Image: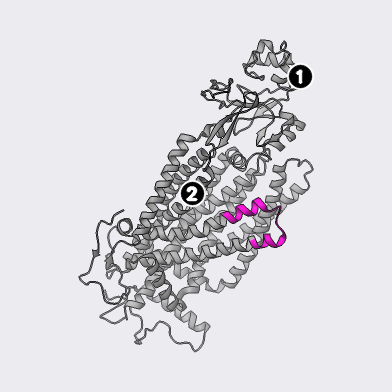
């Protein structure tokens, strides 16, 4: 995107000889090369989208298909060399396996012939006469299409063209419309092949789709809890902080207890036969261990930081006053969340299309298999990078818009007359000048996320072949990238705020923000961390209540699905919803402290250069100073500048 203006000048002063902090004076396009690279990258994503539409066949995945290349429930086109392909299956929406009690997988191919039928046999069929009667009464033909129902009992090839007797009773599975046998023996054998040997994508989609209503309900619960916490933080008091911390502790202990009870229940359940149920048991154990460790760590942190609670309440009151200057900041997560949902739905649709892109191959007996197209795997990785990079770019735009609005309100001399429409002003500045900076910052996060995905993929693929030392090395590398990701998130936030203040590029903003925050860290670093910690506890509270609801809902629907997958999805979405709404407070906190540091750097408190902070912020900063001096007796007043002038508020 070309810059609409070469330079945005608010002051008559031109560029100084030596660069310094100059809040909201200069604006120019930053990191334009990165914006061009992002545009070229998205050109590739658009090509992949078009290719997936042309080459993909999502219907095969969602509706299922028979052994002759026909998608069930659809009108099909013939495949050359496959005489039974190209049939109209609009009335035949279920997949029936002719030998469902003895399924085998050979080279990714089920040994049993699959057919599209109009309904699954709900009662056991013991003879060919019963199979013929079922076909005549229900219109559901269980033998190969080339054999007429009138010849079921007369054809000498009926043994190979019709299902093996007896045909067990079956019901349609909620996803993919598979006819699942209901007798215990066939059910276990069928599920052990179709579910345990199916690819991961099918299994994940199976669990998600079968519990989609529950997932939607739990996400609505997370949204309601997040909105309630936002309202709580807006009018926070010391009592409310104690209540939030108490609820977090009780929620974590309760979830831990439920998880350990579920694991005990699984270990004493002698009916567990499927790998899916055993995997559920392992996932419950992993959840229980992780939750217990997190609970112990949070309890220790709460005990250590308990003495800063009163100052934290004051900190939130100062933050809420900044938000009251532009109250529409609280609605920022709504449009961000809507854009993210739209992008993720589009991304999943393209992924499904890529997963089904393949060419039809006619095999022995006129059956059809689909061979993946060459280069698809590279497109998958490219598509994954696009997911992470674009998602981080959208989130970076939200943070910068929020930071820009706070900066505009802070660096205003007349606090009684705040600027009009600060959010729109911040958004337009971002759109016209600083999109390249957001692209660069989000790319750095992507560089730490993708190696973590690769390490996780390698670990899961090779975990049976690795020794204990190699598994430990994998985990250490993964944790290292996670720590780097957390540090870059904090660095990016300060860099975005510095860009909103100074209008500089990403690297310059990050360097300046790191330097000035290090110089003034004694004022507020520990308190800012505890403020962010209280906000994090709010996210944990939302997560606890939502996960508990998921445990209660999914535990009673264990059949034929790994419910750990939808539970993980619920936990991820709950934390994402809570983070999207509560992160506004984090962004405002970090931006306010950076503005304060810049205020100290550029002004001296004299009548000629008064500070921008108001009286309430000044009183709060002095309370922090007294608290720090009380902890280190004999220390000097850190709020005096180099010339010795104490902080004074702006002159109104």
Answer with left or right where residue 194 lies relative to residue 4: right
Q: Residues within 10 Å of mark 1 (few under 14, many from 20)?
A: few
Closer-to-camera residue (443/556): 443
Q: Name the residue under label 1.
A: 126
**Label 1, label 2: how far apart the Cα atoms are:** 52 Å
Answer with left or right where residue 638 lies relative to residue 284: left
Callout 1 secondary element: loop
On whether residue 334 falls in the magenta region, the answer is: no
Quadrant of the snapshot with the C terminus: bottom left
Q: Residue 382 carries which label?
A: 2
Q: What segment is highlighted magenta in the picture?
A: 454-473
Residue 561 location in percent, x, y? Answer: 65, 40
Q: Which mark is residue 365?
A: none
Residue 156 location in percent, x, y? Answer: 73, 13
Q: At 31% from the left edge and 59% from the top edge, which residue is drawn?
A: 433
Closer-to-camera residue (643/247): 643
Residue at the limit of the structure toward the left, as seen here? 12
Residue 204: quarter of image? top right
Callout 2 secondary element: helix
């Amino acid at each position: 995107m070309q810059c609409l203006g070469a330079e945005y000048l608010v002051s008559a002063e031109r560029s100084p000889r030596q660069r310094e902090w100059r809040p909201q004076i200069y604006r120019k396009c930053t990191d334009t090369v990165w914006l061009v690279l992002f545009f070229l990258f998205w050109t590739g994503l658009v090509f992949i989208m078009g290719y997936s539409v042309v080459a993909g066949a999502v219907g095969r995945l969602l509706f299922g298909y028979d052994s002759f290349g026909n998608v069930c429930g659809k009108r099909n086109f013939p495949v050359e060399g496959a005489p039974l392909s190209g049939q109209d299956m609009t009335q035949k929406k279920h997949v029936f396996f002719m030998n469902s009690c003895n399924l085998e997988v050979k080279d990714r191919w089920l040994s049993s012939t699959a057919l599209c039928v109009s309904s699954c046999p709900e009662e056991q069929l013991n003879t060919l006469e019963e199979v013929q009667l079922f076909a005549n009464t229900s219109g559901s033909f269980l033998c190969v299409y080339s054999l007429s129902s009138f010849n079921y009992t007369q054809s000498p090839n009926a043994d190979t063209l019709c299902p093996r007797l007896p045909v067990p009773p079956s019901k349609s599975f909620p996803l993919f419309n598979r006819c699942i046998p209901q007798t215990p023996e066939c059910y276990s054998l069928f599920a052990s092949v179709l579910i345990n040997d199916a690819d991961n994508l099918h299994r994940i989609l199976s669990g998600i789709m079968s519990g989609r209503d529950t997932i939607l309900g739990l996400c609505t619960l997370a949204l309601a809890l997040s909105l309630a916490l936002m309202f709580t933080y807006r009018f926070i008091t010391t009592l409310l902080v104690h209540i939030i911390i108490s609820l977090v502790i009780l929620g974590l202990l309760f979830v831990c207890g439920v998880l350990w009870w579920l694991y005990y229940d699984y270990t004493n359940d002698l009916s567990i036969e499927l790998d899916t149920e055993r995997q559920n048991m392992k996932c419950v154990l992993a959840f229980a261990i992780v939750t217990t460790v997190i609970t112990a760590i949070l309890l220790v942190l709460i005990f250590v930081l308990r003495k800063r609670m009163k100052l934290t309440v004051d900190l939130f009151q100062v933050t809420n006053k900044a938000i009251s200057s532009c109250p529409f900041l609280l609605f920022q997560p709504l449009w961000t969340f809507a854009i993210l949902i739209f992008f993720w739905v589009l991304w999943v649709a393209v992924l499904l299309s890529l997963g089904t892109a393949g060419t039809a191959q006619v095999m022995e007996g006129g059956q059809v298999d689909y061979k993946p197209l060459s280069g698809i795997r590279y497109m998958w990785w490219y598509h994954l990078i696009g997911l992470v990079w674009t998602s981080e770019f959208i989130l970076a735009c939200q943070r910068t818009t929020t930071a820009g609005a706070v900066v505009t309100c802070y660096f205003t001399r007349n606090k009684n007359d705040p600027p009009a429409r600060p959010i729109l002003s911040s958004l337009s500045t971002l759109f016209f000048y600083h999109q390249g900076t957001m692209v660069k910052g989000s790319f750095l996060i992507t560089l730490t996320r993708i190696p973590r995905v690769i390490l996780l993929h390698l670990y899961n693929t090779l975990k049976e072949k690795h020794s204990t030392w190699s598994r430990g090395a994998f985990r250490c590398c993964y944790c290292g990238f996670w720590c780097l990701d957390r540090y870059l998130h904090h660095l990016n936030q300060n860099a975005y705020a510095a860009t909103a203040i100074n209008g500089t590029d990403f690297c310059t903003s990050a360097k300046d923000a790191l330097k000035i925050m290090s110089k003034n860290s004694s004022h507020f670093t520990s308190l800012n961390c505890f403020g962010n910690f209280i906000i994090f506890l709010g996210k944990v509270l939302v997560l606890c209540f939502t996960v508990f609801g998921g445990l209660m809902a999914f535990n009673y629907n264990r059949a034929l699905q790994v419910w750990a997958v939808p539970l993980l999805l619920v936990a991820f979405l709950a934390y994402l919803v809570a983070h999207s709404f509560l992160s506004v407070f984090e962004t405002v906190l970090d931006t306010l402290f950076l503005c304060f540091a810049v205020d100290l750097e550029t002004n001296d408190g004299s009548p000629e250069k008064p500070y921008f902070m108001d009286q309430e912020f000044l009183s709060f900063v002095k309370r922090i100073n007294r608290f720090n001096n009380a902890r280190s007796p004999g220390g000097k007043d850190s709020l005096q500048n180099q010339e010795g002038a104490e902080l004074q508020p702006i002159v109104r």
